[in-house]
Image (cartoon, coloured by chain):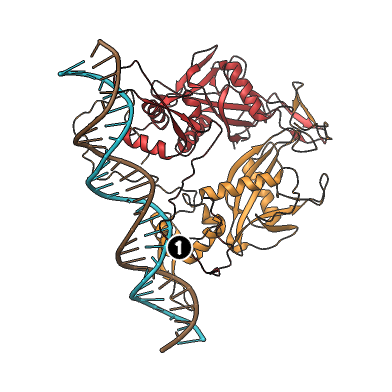
Chain colours: A orange, B red, C brown, D cyan
Amino acid sequence: MAEQEPGPLAARNSAGFEAPAAMTADPVVLAPLHGRLHVLLTRRDTPPQVGRWALPGGFMNPEERAEETAQRKLTEKTGVGAVYLEQLQTYAEPGRDPRGWIPAIAYLALIDATVLRDESSARWFAVEELPEPLAFDHARIVRDGVERLRGKVWYSNIAVGLLPETFTMPQARRVYEAIGGVRHEASNFRRELEQSGLVRSTGEVVKGVPGRPAALYEFVSRQPAWSLRRSRQPALLARIAVAGEPRDSLPPASSAV
Amino acid sequence: MAEQEPGPLAARNSAGFEAPAAMTADPVVLAPLHGRLHVLLTRRDTPPQVGRWALPGGFMNPEERAEETAQRKLTEKTGVGAVYLEQLQTYAEPGRDPRGWIPAIAYLALIDATVLRDESSARWFAVEELPEPLAFDHARIVRDGVERLRGKVWYSNIAVGLLPETFTMPQARRVYEAIGGVRHEASNFRRELEQSGLVRSTGEVVKGVPGRPAALYEFVSRQPAWSLRRSRQPALLARIAVAGEPRDSLPPASSAV
DNA sequence: TAAATAGTGTCTTTAAGACATTATCGC
DNA sequence: GCGATAATGTCTTAAAGACACTATTTA
């Protein structure tokens, strides 16, 4: 490890042991912007590391759940609430914060795409072009957040927060492309997203723009949800009619269909 | 939230704010045993909740990384080190610990299958038959750990720690079946695991047992690794020879092949 | 009618479930 | 040889990449 001075902030509990000096909740707020994935950062205006860009997080208190802290800090910085928030990871390496023993619980946050706007001291940065250096270990935390989002986007409705109430297939496709940093063939994208069961057509169409009008879709659920089909369903197999005794000492398969 | 008494343990930092009273690292140690997935628990012998079964974790200190604490506690309880350890999640709900504000960083841990043995006060429990109630919120933590393991087992070499240095296909299959709680058709299992690129044949076979001798395999890497192929590789597509201008404002696709 | 954009259909390859068949051991 | 177990081969269905084609709007 790096040599570590005690730092200005320390704490001791009533049993006499050293305790964490504090704990922070730090949201990694991601959103597609101009076709690319961006992260929301604020410039530090109090020591240490004044002037560096950092995640818009802050200190927790004992009465608040960590999500609530992250949510609150986010609202303070952007004026809107997150529509999606999930715990990412906790960073507790000794020396990660020069002030002392201060673990950080990081969150992955997505905010409503319709309220993307510059606000106060916060700014959006393309995740591939972060300013250097970021405060503390925040560069690594951002990396972890991007990775998580990219891994989850196909099998969950996590993109709910990145699309308006209703949206068209091409619109959704551009968001998915920005998140993943990849291209999707239009007709295949439509097929996959429709078959995922995560969205449903509203029956309405968009008017007033050149070209064939696009059908509008909405998410079946706006609560966190995962697409079901992970493996193919059994083909035409002749189901065991006899009371087949298990070959091994396994309980009957209880796959979550 | 639930009403919360302050609890006997409290801390305050040098800036005058309340700080976490302590922080724990709690490993969820999983292993297949008798064909089913088990978790290692210890009986609490100090207040609070004396007598309840709990995860074999303990308090962190400022000089130690959280993984190290989890690893150390695990060794103290089982006599062996974890061969796999990854952060699961952090539990910081107010009131989760009656002693005070004590967040827990949970780890998913797997130990070497060849050293599974009862030891000290620790005992193995089938994850579907946990004693009730577990200490604190440990039942939920165990559930989260099992879910994580089951989700990852196919696309990573996480099972490294649950199999000996070299192993046969039927042996690996039984471990995967125990983890997932499902059955796998033997020949399909072989095909999938071989194609995953995670294992490789050693060229040797097992002797001295009835039946056709089984070929021995080993993991290509014992470091945490993920299977590559997540989507099929492009078929026979006529690659763009011209400098095709992108249709949208997207950068050229940089899919991680 | 032309340009632009959305949507449909289908050819192809790969992944994967099911299961019959073959191989090789100990006794 | 027989029972036991491992390994191979293959038939089938579904998922998914590629791309030609059709449909519907605005200007």
> x, y percentage for residue A89?
62, 39
In the image, A230 versus A11, the foreground residue is: A230
Mark 1 lies on residue:
A185
Check the image and report above or below for B170 versus A188: above
Image point (27%, 45%), residue name: A235
> x, y percentage for residue A106?
65, 43
Quadrant of the image containing the C terminus of chain A: top left
User: What's the amino acid at mark 1?
Assistant: Glu
In-image side of B198 versus A146 (left or right): left
Image point (75%, 29%), residue name: B11
In-image side of B191 versus A237 (left or right): right
Q: Chain of mark 1?
A: A
Dot 1 falls on a residue whose secondary structure is loop
* Crowd around label 1: few <14 · some 14–19 · many ≥20 (10 Å): few
In the image, B207 versus B86, the foreground residue is: B207
Q: Is residue A23 visible?
A: yes
In the image, D22 versus A45, the foreground residue is: D22
Quadrant of the image containing the N terminus of chain A: top right
Q: Residue B82 sits in which quadrant?
A: top right
> x, y percentage for residue A182?
53, 58
In-image side of A58 versus B139 (left or right): right
Check the image and report above or below for B40 versus A29: above
In-image side of A36 versus B10 (left or right): left
How many marks are shown on the rendered structure? Answer: 1
